[in-house]
Amino acid sequence: MNNTVLLFVALPMALGLLLIVLERWQRLSSFLAVLIPLSLSGLALVFSRSLNLTFLGQQFFLEDSLNVFGRTIQIEANQLSIIALLYFVCFLWNLPVNSFDHNHWFNSLSLIISGLWVLVQFINPFLYSALVVELIVLVCVPLLSPRGAPAKAGIMRYLTMQTLALPLILLSGWMVAGIETSPSAQALVSRGAFLVLTGFMLWAGVFPLHSWLPMLSEESQPWSFSFLLVIMQVSLTFFFLHFLNQYPWLRNLEQLGIVLKWLGTLSIFGAGVLAAFQTNLKRISSYIYMAETGYIILSLAYLPQGGLDIITMSMLPRLFGIWSLNFAISYLSKNISSEKMELEDLKGIIYRFPRTSGLLLISFLNIIGMPLFSLFPSKRIIWGIVIADNPVFQILGILGFLGFMIAILRTLNILIKKPENGEEKVEKPITILPIALIVLTMVLAGIFPQLFSAPIQNILPSFNNLFP
Amino acid sequence: MSDILNTLPIYIALIAALLNLVRRQWSLNLIALVIQFIFIIPSLLNLYPIQIALIQPFTGIMVSLMLYLTLNETGGIEPINLTRTVTPGEIFRALAGIFLLAIILFFINDFQKAVFPTVPPQHLYLSFGLMLMGILQLGTIREPLYLAIGLLTFLSGFQLLYSALEFSYLLEALFVAVNLLLGIVGSFFIVKNAESGSE
């Protein structure tokens, strides 16, 4: 196993398959599903400085490439931080999974999916990654479609939209192959850029191609769904950065910046406005995810003004914010036995689950970027740049923010309504520990943002063409 | 004569895709799907040696078989009834499909010259015909089997197009994996629906 590709792609996928066999021993399977991604994440960090490591007098050396069907998959040392982050996401979501209602495939499939997302980043030619993304979409299906229920419209829409993205990405690469040598082919470049952007919009659920997001969130278990969305968001961000880094025709396209600015702002605006009218907590959380995608797109639009730094600064706080929000939703969903999580089901829940309800509200405030919380510093910077650029974006952003405030206030209003049948507290006292830790982390990350951005800084050298 | 021999398989494959779009009879649809995969072989043989040209149709037939076995297991297979009356929905889908195929046929030469100059027009017609039939299928029904058939038709059209643009063993392997997984997902949905329907 002295090869980065075997260690970080093949091994986790093989272990994921093994976990399917071990599924009947749930505890062992869960333990391994926590231990394996944590170890892989740690190993990736250790080797991220050099693939040649001396430890206790022993020398460890990893080869950086592997030939598969005549093509080379290469993972170099400076790219291992991306892998560390992806397996850290897998670890974070596997850690509390047994506390919630979850799909029995989660342990094994989360590991396989993480391995496939790693492969997406490093397959060569990297356009073939579009097919690996399609494989991931298909592997995700058992996690998104709970047992005992028929396949619903959301999962069908999701499969359709994701499959439609595949030809767009593959054709874009073919269409503009060798374009660097013929700079006059402006029409071809515009066509290629259009295909790439539409493909990414379909994959990430960017406004207005987001219809599968709220539908699917309503149908699936929040914990599995949030894992799939977060790991996809992180991976697609890096994948798009690879695109920009590799293709000068795309990154030098004048209109790209303005298109990304509009897409980002409209995603934030659309998500906020739509969230304000929702009566389902899971749908609100899906719109939060959509808005966060909007913030990432805005950061990509402002790459010359330091967008890459904003992405690295917000990456860990964002995934932790979504993690804590879904922690609260999943905990409540299990304990009030509400699969749908309609706001009506949460009536007076604050009297029965004060700590988890508090975490839910704090997570909301954290993720929309309120001061003192972890996402505030990055959002302050991005809005500072946006305001100086175009007041229309500012107005749309404010409206989106107000939409989320309305959604939060509506949730709060339901939470504090006096319940009709009893107000006894049923929350386990032990919950104070993880909840206090989560809130403390959010506040600490807000006060000392560099704590959360430092581990991601190593990723930047992989995108050396994107620095102004 | 050779012209007819060249174009006949293309039209048979497209008619099979159209039949899948129009008629909702599982056994008939699976037979049409197999025919569709068999009749793309001549187009692929124009590009590749037989051992490579057979990969895509062979995978497609395997997936069709997978879907047939699942449907058979869940009791979904009924004898083909060709005398069943035609519904307004079927007429609408048939007209929409024929209209789309006619539009592609009308514009295919210009489109080929402008965008895909290296791909023969007939090959392009078959690819885009299958892709559009697949998309139309996906847009008109929610039943799992038809979702699987729609996705398979769409992907087979795209795979056909891309095979004329670029060849790589890795790409072929990935396409095979995607098609097989799609078959498994289709079967998964069929079983889920059958289980939840019987509860």
Image (cartoon, rainbow, N blue to C red):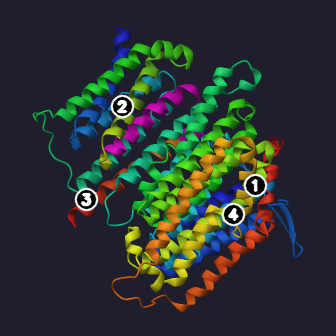
For this rendering, which residue is in front, A311 or A357? A357
Q: Main secondary structure of the magenta part?
A: helix
Viewer-nearest of discs 1 and 3: 1
Q: CA distance from mark 4 to mark 3?
A: 45 Å
Which mark sits nearer the N-terminus, 1 or 4? 4
Residue at disc 3, secondary structure? helix
State yes or no: residue B169 in magenta.
yes
Asked if marks 1 and 2 touch (Cβ < 8 Å), the reply is no
Q: Residues within 10 Å of mark 1 (few under 14, many from 20)?
A: some
In this picture, residue A353 sits left or right of residue B21: right
The percent position of residue B96, horizontal first and vertical second, equals 30, 27
Q: Residues within 10 Å of mark 4 (few under 14, many from 20)?
A: many
Query: On what subunit does the disc labeled 2 rest?
Result: B
For this rendering, which residue is in front, A193 or A256? A256
Asked if marks 4 and 3 touch (Cβ < 8 Å), the reply is no
Q: CA distance from mark 3 to mark 2?
A: 27 Å
Q: Which image quadrant: the C terminus of chain A?
A: top right
Q: CA distance from mark 4 to mark 2?
A: 45 Å
Q: Report the residue marked by disc 4.
A: A375
Q: Report the residue marked by disc 3.
A: B194
Q: Which residues are magenta?
A: B146-173
Q: Residues within 10 Å of mark 3 (few under 14, many from 20)?
A: some
The amino acid type of the residue labelled 3 equals Ala
Q: Report the residue marked by disc 1.
A: A381
The amino acid type of the residue labelled 1 equals Ile
Is residue A23 something one can see in this rendering? yes
Query: On what subunit does the disc labeled 1 rest?
Result: A
Residue at disc 1, secondary structure? helix
Q: Report the residue marked by disc 2.
A: B133
Marks 4 & 3 on one chain: no
The amino acid type of the residue labelled 2 equals Met
